[in-house]
Amino acid sequence: MPRSISPEKRNTYMALLEKLWQKGEIDADVAARELGLSIVEARRCIDLLASKLQWRWIERIPGTSRLILRGRSTFFRALGTRSTEKRKIAARVVGNYVRPGDTLALGSGSTAAFIAMELVRQSADVHILTNNAFAFSYLHGMSDSPLEHNRIECTGGRYHLDRNFFYGPSALAAFRKRAVTTAIVSLNGITAEGELLLASALEAEIDRELMRLADGKRRVVVAMDSAKIKVPRGLEVVHVLGDIPARDKGRYVLATTKPDDASAEAEALDYYRRHVIVDCVT
């Protein structure tokens, strides 16, 4: 059996990935300086990521310890923004709703990428089905971590390079046929009236299906950072909180961070609480 990666090493790999998202490229010298590693340790980390995470959007320059992103897609630009820390907090909140033995349907989006990293950090004993190309690559690529006994599946389907997800009939069918216990979606915003929004119509089609999974004993967890609360209309509507039956309120969770200006968002959060569980943390 492969030896598990220690929590300290796993955190280093995550930090290295975040630097790559922010800068678009990173080499061993920069990694050593900014992460407080020896040059030998930095090279080993880059070697591991280059060997295990062979993504089409990450490339290692031959003969060097340097990784670059192939193009700055919308997905990776979102990962490198200033609200990264808030998305990581929202991901940890989502982790509180994951139970051993769960079968998770994990949607697309940058917050979902941090959720995948959080599941690895927790060594969560779950089965994961996702259309998020980064999440699948990360979870599958780190298979010699404590997550090695879990089952990680990708829906497949048509691939959207800029937003880094799979969509279309094949992806929808994969989610529909799986006996999911918890669906996790990350969205681009929520209006004051409780309309859940996404920028992409193709992503919205998938997430509408995931939102419909909250029947029986299933749960839907919606993750977003506080910057996305009370946004104006104009994007694709995935779901409306007011349409959720009162009997199903306990099956929907809005996991978010405390707004910077709490008073400006308090009214909206109170409205959301009428329809779903709101888990709002600092």
Image (spheres, rainbow, N blue to C red):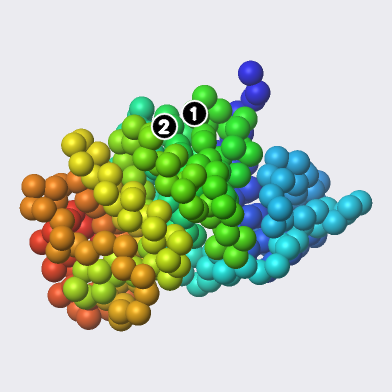
State the image coordinates of residue 95 (x, y, percent, origin top left).
36, 44
Q: Element at badge 2? A: loop
Residue in view at x 71 percent, y 53 percent: 56
Residue in view at x 31 percent, y 63 percent: 238
The alpha-carbon separation of the residues under discs 2 and 1 comes to 6 Å
Between 224 and 4, the residue placed more toward the observer is 224
Q: Element at badge 1? A: loop
Between 175 and 39, the residue placed more toward the observer is 175
Instruction: Tell me: residue 104, above or below residue 28.
Output: above
Between 52 and 18, the residue placed more toward the observer is 52
Residue in view at x 19 percent, y 62 percent: 241
Kind of residue sitting beneath label 1: Asn
Q: How crowded is mark 2: few (under 14 residues within 10 Å), some or many (20 or more)?
A: some
Residue in view at x 68 percent, y 44 percent: 53
In the rendered image, the quadrant that contains the C terminus is: bottom left
Kind of residue sitting beneath label 2: Val
Residue farthest toward the right in the current orientation of the protein? 63
Q: Quick check: can you spot residue 116?
A: no
Q: Are dots 2 and 1 in contact, CB under 8 Å?
A: yes
Q: Does residue 128 appear to the left or right of 229 in the view shown?
A: right
Q: Does residue 186 appear to the left or right of 131 in the view shown?
A: left
State the image coordinates of residue 91 (x, y, percent, origin top left).
40, 53
Q: How crowded is mark 1: few (under 14 residues within 10 Å), some or many (20 or more)?
A: some
Q: Does residue 38 appear to the left or right of 196 in the view shown?
A: right
State the image coordinates of residue 101 (x, y, percent, origin top left).
36, 27
- Label 2 sits on residue: 126
- Label 1 sits on residue: 150
Quarter of the rendering containing residue 232: bottom left
Q: Quick check: can you spot residue 170?
A: yes
Residue farthest toward the left in the current orientation of the protein? 246
State the image coordinates of residue 6 (x, y, percent, origin top left).
59, 35
